[in-house]
């Protein structure tokens, strides 16, 4: 069955993984009387330090189950209710709130923002600029999504209001989605955890730390940083793709930004030509994350969240990225094939 195949993919890549894939149009309706969704066990090495979620989906535990759709399945789930760090995937909620405020007339998307050296965190986009730059709020949203620009996300968060995102998550029924500040707060936590006063100090100290010290940092603990579950993230994407997360115009804006993400080696790499994948990545040392929607030429739409943890504390692992795409494709193919869901 699909979850067994996905578990084998994760095991070959040497990662522990959580995955949730859902048929958006089937999940948008009640489906009483259906079969059980895909159920399985395992999924590669256990997540270090995880105790498992309320569904017993921890290391080596039994897997998630959910309602199916008559004559087939509408979800594939592997540890989908396990609380995990989501890193930059929180930016989907951020730009959704921005888009909602724009449509409501609370923000002008053309408003200009001056980005100075004090704002920059390093990385992609304006976060790595050498000189001051002036951009619009709308372009901050674009940079935050297309290249996961942390400075753009911080400045946008400052404008929409950091306290609003937890309220938005609650409004959308994302009870287990925890938002703890933005990228700058994460950086400040990282500096404190290694005893660094500046980013230069951190760059010097971090490579010398043993793996167990790194994994003990708060940025890897779902209880102390921004976190959610694979199932809640696909729920968020479903609400956006069905225009249920806010005004249709706002949802369309988010879909457009996600479709312009430049990173293609994870989910998008797993699907054949002709399948349009809009996504958002998240990365931390040893953590490889992505959530997105695959849209097929025949109109099928499938939200997928794949979150994996590798033993190696690297952020660039093409083998892991490609395994994520393969797992996503296997899950979606199982949804498209239909038929009774099995049990592993």
Image: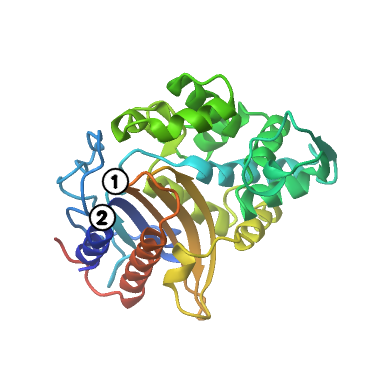
The percent coordinates of residue 309 (x first, y second) are 33, 47
Q: Is residue 329 left or right of residue 158?
A: left
**Residue in the picture at 76% in, 42% down:** 130
Query: How far apart in space, not on screen, are marks 1 and 2 (Cα)?
Result: 7 Å
Q: Nearer the viewer, residue 153 or 132?
A: 132
| Mark identifier at residue 311 | 1
- Which color scheme is applied? rainbow
Q: Nearer the viewer, residue 147 or 30?
A: 147
Q: Is residue 112 visible in this depiction of the protein?
A: yes
For disc 2, the marked residue is 14
**Residue in the picture at 22% in, 58% down:** 11
Determine crowd level at label 1: few under 14, some 14-19, many 20+ residues with C-alpha closer than 10 A: some
**Mark closer to the chain start, 1 or 2:** 2
| Mark identifier at residue 122 | none
The percent coordinates of residue 244 (x first, y second) are 57, 52
Determine crowd level at label 2: few under 14, some 14-19, many 20+ residues with C-alpha closer than 10 A: many
Q: Is residue 175 visible in this depiction of the protein?
A: no
Q: Is residue 54 left or right of residue 250?
A: left
Q: Is residue 283 above or below residue 222?
A: below
The percent coordinates of residue 217 (x first, y second) are 38, 27
Residue contact between numbered discs 1 and 2, judged by CB atoms under 8 Å? yes
The percent coordinates of residue 168 (x first, y second) are 57, 36
**Screen quadrant of the N terminus:** bottom left
SS class, disc 1: loop
SS class, disc 2: loop
Q: Is residue 324 left or right of residue 246?
A: left
């Amino acid at each position: 069955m699909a979850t067994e195949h996905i578990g084998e993919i994760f095991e070959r890549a040497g990662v522990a993984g959580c995955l949730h894939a859902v048929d958006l149009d089937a999940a948008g309706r009640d489906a009483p009387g259906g079969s059980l969704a895909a159920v399985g066990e395992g999924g590669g090495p256990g997540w270090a330090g995880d105790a498992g979620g309320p569904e017993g989906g921890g290391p080596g535990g039994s897997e998630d189950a959910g309602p199916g759709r008559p004559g087939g399945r509408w979800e594939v789930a592997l540890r989908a209710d396990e609380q995990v760090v989501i890193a930059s995937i929180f930016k989907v909620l951020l730009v959704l709130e921005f888009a909602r405020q724009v449509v409501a007339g609370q923000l002008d998307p053309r408003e200009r923002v001056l980005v100075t050296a004090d704002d920059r965190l390093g990385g992609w986009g304006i976060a790595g600029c050498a000189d001051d730059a002036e951009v619009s709020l709308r372009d901050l949203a674009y940079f935050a999504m297309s290249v996961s620009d942390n400075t753009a996300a911080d400045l946008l968060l400052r404008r929409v209001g950091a306290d609003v995102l937890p309220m938005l998550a609650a409004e959308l029924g994302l009870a287990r989605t925890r938002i703890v500040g933005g990228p700058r707060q994460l950086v400040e936590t990282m500096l404190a955890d290694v005893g660094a006063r500046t980013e230069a100090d951190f760059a010097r100290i971090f490579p010398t730390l043993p793996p167990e010290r790194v994994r003990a940092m708060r940025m890897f603990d779902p209880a102390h940083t921004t976190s959610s579950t694979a199932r809640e993230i696909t729920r968020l994407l479903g609400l956006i793709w069905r225009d249920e997360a806010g005004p249709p115009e706002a949802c369309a804006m988010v879909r457009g930004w996600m479709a312009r993400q430049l990173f293609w080696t994870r989910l998008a790499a797993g699907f054949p030509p002709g399948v349009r994948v809009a996504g958002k990545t998240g990365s931390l040392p040893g953590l490889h994350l992505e959530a997105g929607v695959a849209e097929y030429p025949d109109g099928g739409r499938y939200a997928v969240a794949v979150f994996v943890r590798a033993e190696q504390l690297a952020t660039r692992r093409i083998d892991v990225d490609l395994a994520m795409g393969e797992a996503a494709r296997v899950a979606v193919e199982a949804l498209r094939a239909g038929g009774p869901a099995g049990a592993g």
